[in-house]
């Protein structure tokens, strides 16, 4: 009732814990969700194309761009000498050049930019460049880099106890090696930026980036301008997965530089092949292990050596390799452990963040160790895993000396094993394998424990801006970015819950650096944790003002003012929310607030690799069943059962989607997605024709994904929820272990197959043949 302000009875608000659709779901389905390349092209738009290096490592003897400048449609050509500020677009170490200067360090490195009236004209002009090289020694893979002693930093050591002494005293001992490949992000929307010049040398950039503030700061560095001169905006991305955390800066900076120099808008959008060649991937790893254990399969000592291909520059490789070390324990207590990590510099595109950020590589390493111990003892791998789980006092300290305070892995594993009937199915599968000479089945149940927080402590902060308008509508802005993961709807639900209004009142807006400054990347699975808390902080500020206003106006005690689904209750009356907001406006109450949140309790000493880098852990477990053809190596995941802990879910529909998507993407990394570089450092798998991501046909026919009903968070996260972006990715390790089980059946399970990742059909076939040969030789 608009005149009196008395509120009608309403249904409960759609706030947190409700399974609401993604805020752009209808637009996604209808094709009306606007991405950067969908924006109307402004008059005078220039299309920017980047000329790329054809060598892995070489001096640039000659770079003649005169024919490029003279080509039809070309307006501007830029190279290193045309940069007014610093020739750098790196996140940390200042070693990523916008344009190569005197030397190239990987195939696909940006040499120059062509700005023309069409992308066709820009590409046609770029091939006219005359580039002469003097080749230098190039390390393409880990082995070559090891031989040349090329590293991005000194090798790192994390340890607790005396691993070598424990190994020497162990009743049993096994050594082994294996490798795992990288992975391309293959986001549906590729890298893209649209820059528009503003007065005074300022510039606005639409960028498909997970880190608008970093793109802003790097562009300002290139332009030699203050951060205030650059505004970066993101409404949504068509996927990111870490590939747009740092590497969007190259394309955004090129577009911004063209826009400022010409006074015309500029777009830089590489095609899929160029995108895959020019941008970094998940780090590929080589692993060596030496594990001691007893006859019951309990670990007594472990020495683990990790080596990764970091690429030509540092990017985020130090933190990524650190996280691999952090997750080399997974859910297991390691009585005495030493983890060595070698970060090799290679003359390939710099590898970068990818969902899990090194965690999957470390976790796959320890799960391989568990399978090796099971094979050596003849025990069920699940039983070996159970016997090595973290426990109470004396069995709850990680290799980096953080106490595991909320260990729910045992309960999760037991619940999943019972609900999916693991033991019965394993017996049935082994019976099937005894009578099936060609087709073989495998099954595995593996857990996940994933630390939540940026391990670089200062990144654990977020800001938000909230406006309550006089009609009761709410404008929400925060520092997180939406890449399809449902962050925006979750934060909107948090704000709606705070005011006890329907979520439809909350307007989601673009992430813009001139609204919320100095934000962290949307990464480390911390988007909802950080930005949700910042938005809640802003909402509580406004609510506190409204309570004081109502208490004074209606002469009641502050505790007699309450926000309810039916409206704002003041004493014995309840007022419609919009009417109440207008009364506050008329009374000159500030209805805007900036919120802030910094994660508590965390600290870390990188010099000693000790501390509490994680606020809490997210847990999960997956049981996967596979079928392989031993004559062709073909493999099918026939069933997967997943139980995952998201605490008190902010949005069960969104969380279930993240778990399913993460699992399928993890399957791709471990089974089909193979990156191949030739001896000259050229990526040969740079298009969908040569690089196979999972499709709908790869989804298991039986895929049961459940949120753990007992889920909770002992830490004071927003509404006691837990992060869900990255942890589900590692549930797919169960697929790789199940494939090993199937392949091992060819030799009557006498040994763990030599099967690296990805387990492509070729790799599975070769592993089967190797197991057969070894069985014959026994």
Image (tube, rainbow, N blue to C red):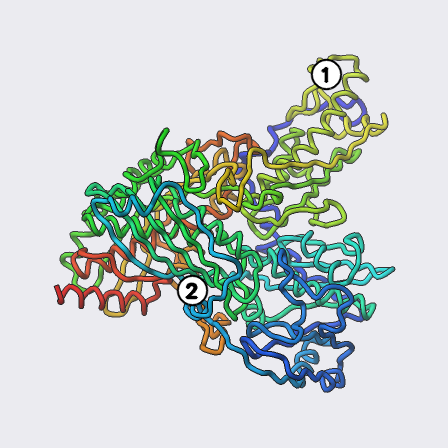
Q: Give the percent coordinates (x, y) of residue 599.
A: 59, 36
400 vs 297, nearest the viewer:
400
Which tag, 1 or 2, sits closer to the chain's start?
A: 1
The label shown at residue 673 is 2
Q: Please give the name of the residue rendered at 62% of the width and 63% of the height, measured from the top-left corner.
A: 95
Quadrant for the C terminus in the image: bottom left
Quadrant for the N terminus in the image: top right
Q: Please give the name of the residue rendered at 78% of the width and 32% of the height, measured from the top-left corner.
A: 591
Q: Where 333 sits versus 87, above or below?
A: above
Q: Give the percent coordinates (x, y) of residue 745.
A: 20, 58
SS of the residue under disc 2: loop
16 with respect to 567 (left or right): left
Q: Quadrant of residue 569?
A: top right
Q: Where 97 sits versus 366, above or below?
A: below
Q: Which of pointers 1 and 2 indicates the residue nearer the eye?
A: 2
587 vs 590, nearest the viewer:
590
Residue 682 visible in image: no
385 vs 88, nearest the viewer:
88
How many labels sit on residues?
A: 2
Q: Give the percent coordinates (x, y) of residue 510.
A: 70, 49
672 vs 460, nearest the viewer:
460
- State the residue position of label 1: 558
């Amino acid at each position: 009732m608009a005149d009196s302000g008395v509120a009608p009875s309403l249904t409960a608000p759609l706030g947190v814990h409700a399974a609401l659709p993604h805020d752009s779901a209808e637009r996604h389905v209808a094709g009306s969700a606007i991405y950067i390349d969908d924006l109307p092209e402004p008059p005078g738009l220039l299309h920017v194309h980047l000329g790329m290096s054809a060598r892995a490592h070489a001096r640039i003897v000659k770079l003649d761009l005169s024919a490029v400048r003279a080509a039809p449609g070309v307006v501007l050509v830029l190279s290193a000498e045309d940069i007014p500020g610093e020739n750098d677009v790196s996140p940390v170490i200042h070693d990523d050049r916008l344009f190569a200067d005197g030397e190239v360090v990987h195939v696909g490195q940006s040499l120059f930019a062509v700005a023309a009236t069409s992308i066709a004209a820009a590409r046609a002009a770029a091939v006219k460049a005359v580039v002469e090289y003097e080749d230098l020694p190039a390390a393409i893979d880990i082995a070559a880099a090891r031989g040349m002693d090329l590293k991005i930093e000194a090798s790192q050591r994390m340890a607790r106890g005396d691993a070598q002494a424990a190994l020497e005293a162990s009743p049993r001992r096994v050594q082994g090696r294996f490798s795992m490949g990288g992975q391309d992000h293959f986001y549906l929307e590729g890298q893209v930026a649209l820059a528009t010049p503003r007065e005074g040398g300022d510039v606005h950039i639409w960028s498909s980036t997970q880190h608008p503030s970093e793109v802003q700061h790097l562009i300002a560095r290139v332009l030699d301008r203050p951060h205030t001169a650059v505004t970066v905006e993101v409404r949504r991305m068509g996927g990111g997965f870490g590939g747009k955390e740092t590497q969007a800066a190259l394309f955004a900076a090129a577009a911004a530089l063209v826009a400022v120099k010409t006074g015309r808008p500029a777009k830089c959008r590489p095609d899929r092949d160029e995108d895959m060649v020019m941008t970094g991937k998940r780090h590929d790893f080589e692993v060596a292990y030496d594990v001691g254990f007893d006859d019951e399969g309990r670990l007594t000592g472990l020495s683990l050596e990790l080596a990764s291909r970091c690429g030509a520059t540092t990017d985020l490789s130090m933190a990524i390799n650190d996280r691999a070390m952090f997750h080399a324990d997974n859910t297991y207590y390691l009585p005495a452990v030493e983890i060595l990590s070698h970060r090799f510099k290679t003359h390939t595109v710099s590898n970068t963040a990818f969902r899990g950020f090194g965690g999957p590589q470390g976790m796959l390493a320890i799960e391989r160790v568990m399978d090796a111990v099971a094979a050596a003892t003849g025990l069920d791998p699940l039983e070996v895993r159970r016997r090595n789980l973290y426990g109470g006092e004396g069995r709850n300290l990680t290799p980096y000396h953080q106490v595991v305070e909320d260990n729910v892995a045992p309960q999760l594993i037991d619940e999943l094993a019972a609900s999916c009937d693991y033991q019965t199915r394993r017996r049935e599968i082994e019976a099937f394998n005894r009578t099936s000479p060609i087709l073989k089945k495998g099954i595995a149940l593996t857990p996940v424990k994933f630390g939540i927080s940026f391990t670089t402590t200062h990144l654990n902060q977020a800001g938000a801006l909230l406006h309550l308008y006089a009609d009761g509508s709410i404008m929400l802005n925060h520092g997180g970015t939406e890449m399809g993961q449902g962050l925006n709807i979750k934060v909107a639900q948090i704000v709606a819950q705070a005011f006890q209004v329907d979520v439809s009142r909350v307007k989601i807006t673009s992430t813009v650096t001139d609204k919320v400054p100095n934000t962290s990347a949307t990464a480390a699975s911390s988007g909802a944790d950080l930005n949700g808390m910042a938005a809640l902080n802003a909402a509580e500020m406004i609510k506190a003002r409204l309570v004081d206003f109502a208490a004074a106006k209606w002469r009641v005690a502050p505790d007699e003012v309450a926000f309810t689904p039916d409206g704002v209750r003041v004493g014995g009356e309840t007022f419609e929310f919009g009417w109440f907001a207008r009364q506050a406006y008329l009374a000159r109450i500030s209805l805007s607030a900036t919120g802030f949140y910094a994660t508590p309790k965390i600290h870390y000493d990188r010099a000693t690799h000790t501390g509490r880098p994680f606020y809490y852990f997210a847990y999960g477990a997956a049981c996967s069943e596979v079928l392989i053809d031993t004559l062709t190596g073909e493999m099918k995941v026939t069933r997967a059962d997943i139980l995952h802990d998201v605490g008190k879910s902010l949005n069960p529909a969104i969380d279930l989607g993240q778990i399913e998507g993460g699992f399928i993407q993890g399957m791709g990394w471990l089974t089909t997605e193979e990156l191949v570089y030739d001896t000259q450092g050229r990526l040969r798998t740079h298009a969908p024709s040569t690089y196979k991501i999972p499709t709908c046909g790869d989804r298991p026919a039986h895929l049961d994904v459940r949120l753990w009903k007992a889920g909770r968070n002992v830490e004071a996260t927003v509404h006691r929820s837990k992060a869900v972006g990255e942890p589900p990715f590692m549930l797919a390790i169960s697929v790789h272990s199940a494939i090993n089980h199937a392949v091992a059946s060819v030799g009557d399970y006498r040994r763990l197959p030599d099967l690296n990742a990805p387990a492509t059909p070729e790799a599975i076939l070769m592993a089967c043949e190797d197991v057969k040969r070894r069985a014959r030789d026994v």
